[in-house]
């Protein structure tokens, strides 16, 4: 065997959403419901900062406490 297998470690696990990191190939695995994503370190950084910006945008629009409520219930319009 020339290739070493992936040994991803769980970083965060919540209901329906899991984030794993593989130090071997420095990649991230996201499992979200039926969807599974395999992301390079760069893509994961882009995703993380986009999510952070999105949450900040929500905070700016609705205020922090309401955002927490929205995220808990799911965002409806
Ligand atoms: Zn790997």
Image (cartoon, helix red, strand yellow):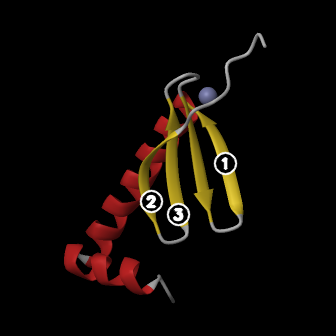
* Residue at horizontal 28 percent and vertical 68 percent from the top: 59
The 10 Å Cα crowd at callout 3, few under 14, some 14 to 19, many 20 or more, is some
Label 2 CB sits under 8 Å from any ligand 1 atom: no
Q: Earlier in the sequence, mark 1 or mark 2?
A: 2
- Which residue occupies the foreground of this view, 42 or 2? 2
Taking the image as shown, residue 26 lies to the left or right of residue 66, namely right
* Residue at horizontal 53 percent and vertical 25 percent from the top: 26
Q: Quadrant of residue 36?
A: bottom right
Residue 17 disc label? 3
Residue 37 disc label? 1
Quick check: marks 1 and 3 in contact, CB under 8 Å? no
State how far apart marks 1 and 2 are (Cα).
15 Å
Q: Quadrant of residue 4?
A: top right
Quick check: marks 3 and 2 in contact, CB under 8 Å? yes
Q: Position of residue 47 (x, y in %)?
A: 51, 45
The 10 Å Cα crowd at callout 2, few under 14, some 14 to 19, many 20 or more, is few
Q: State the residue position of label 2.
A: 13
Q: Secondary structure at mark 2?
A: strand
* Residue at horizontal 66 percent and vertical 41 percent from the top: 38
In this rendering, is residue 61 above or below 17? below
- Which residue occupies the foreground of this view, 41 or 77? 41
Q: Which residue in the rendered view is the most extreme toward the front? A: 1
State how far apart marks 1 and 3 are (Cα).
11 Å
- Which residue occupies the foreground of this view, 61 or 48? 48
Q: Position of residue 6 (x, y in %)?
A: 63, 30
Q: Secondary structure at mark 1?
A: strand
Q: If the picture is divided into quarters, which one holds ligand 1?
A: top right
Q: Position of residue 32 (x, y in %)?
A: 60, 62
């Amino acid at each position: 065997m020339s290739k070493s297998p992936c040994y991803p470690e769980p970083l965060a696990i919540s209901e329906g959403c899991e984030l794993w990191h593989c130090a071997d190939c420095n990649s991230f695995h996201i499992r979200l419901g039926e969807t599974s994503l395999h992301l390079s370190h760069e893509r994961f950084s882009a995703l993380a900062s986009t999510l952070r910006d999105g949450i900040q945008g929500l905070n700016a629009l609705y205020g922090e406490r309401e955002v927490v409520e929205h995220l808990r219930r799911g965002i409806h319009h």
